[in-house]
Amino acid sequence: MPKTYNELYLALRQRLRDAGVDAHALEARLIVAGAAGKTPEKLLQDLQLYASDEIEQRVDALAARRLSGEPAAYLVGRWGFYGLDLAVTPDVLIPRMDTEVLVDCALARLRGKTELARVLDLCTGSGCIGCAIAHALPQSRAVLADISAPALAVARENIAALGLTGRVTAELLDVRCDPPRALGSFDMIVSNPPYIRDDEMPKLDASVRDYEPALALAAGADGLDFYRAIAEKWTPLLRLGGWMLLEVGEGQAPDVTALLRRAGLRSLGTARDTAGTERVVFGRK
């Protein structure tokens, strides 16, 4: 007997809950919507409609992959961040709520002051940080930079889908190398760089270790390789009065703050995520 979309959703939500998936309701909604070729909003409108056998089979297939550990974001190719619906692929990290703290901090320093700001997003991945800032500040401009060409393809897809073409560009750059002179100067540099220590990589949750790109995670013996490079090589691109804001891993805030201090930044501080962890380090030129 055919099932309604609501029945498929409720059954999958229960399966994910029983499997210990924290965001079981959100993920069930995204998976059913993805299997049906609908947006989550359209799915809510169609909950009482009957799904075809083919769609039910697709839901079951996606559910099996999710329960084997594959992240829901990669299954459906979409994920929400700062109110935006973003494309994601296994070439980029899945945007996390913790990273929204970085966007909050950035906007607090730009709104009403330098809304014409030029922003540089290093190690951009999906482009979630730079796109969120540019979307919130329609007069701003941004450059999204990454060493991964496949990641930049995802970032460019998000730039276009959000209507940011013309104000936001994506550039192939390695933060460990000196920046090209043609890049110019910026009012703000933001980054969520790789920050996992080499010895921590095998201990990561399987959903991260086995599916998310190691290129966006591994950061050397102490996890600070990229922070050192950003502080040393990219601080000179900040305009006077400009801000640098960096997402950090648990326990890294003191070391990263020291790096920014040695780079000559002042007004140093941190911001905590919803769990109380120091998640963002910032400083001003």
Image (cartoon, grey):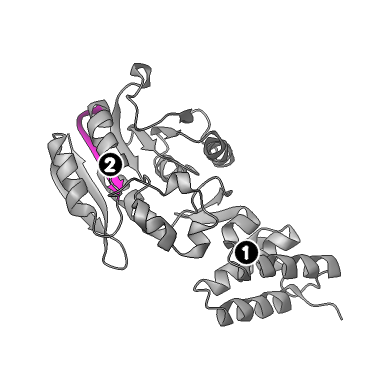
- Residue that numbered label 1 is attached to: 30
Decide whether the magenta segment is chiefly helix, strand or loop: strand
Quadrant of the frame with the N terminus: bottom right
**Left or right for 282, reference 140:** left
Q: Say whether residue 129 is visible.
A: yes
Front in this rendered view, residue 242 or 280: 280
| Sequence order check, earlier mark of 2 and 1 | 1
- State the extent of the magenta-drawn residues as a range: 238-247
Report helix, strand or loop for mark 2.
helix
Measure the C-alpha gap from mark 2 to mark 1.
35 Å
**Residue 47 in the image, given as x and y percentages of width and height:** 71, 72
92 part of magenta stretch: no
Nearer the observer: mark 2 or 1; the answer is 2
Report helix, strand or loop for mark 1.
helix
**Residue 144 in the image, given as x and y percentages of width and height:** 43, 34
Q: Is residue 190 above or below residue 19?
A: above
- Residue that sits furthest to the top in the current view: 182
User: Which quadrant of the view contains residue 162?
Assistant: top right
Please tell me which residue is depicted at 53% across the width and 57% down the height of the picture. 210
**Left or right for 261, reference 70:** left
**Residue 75 in the image, given as x and y percentages of width and height:** 64, 58
Mark 1 neighbour density, 10 Å: few (under 14) some (14–19) many (20 or more): many
Residue 227, numbered circle:
2
**Left or right for 52, reference 230:** right
Q: Is residue 169 above or below residue 182?
A: below
Q: Amino acid at mark 2?
A: Tyr
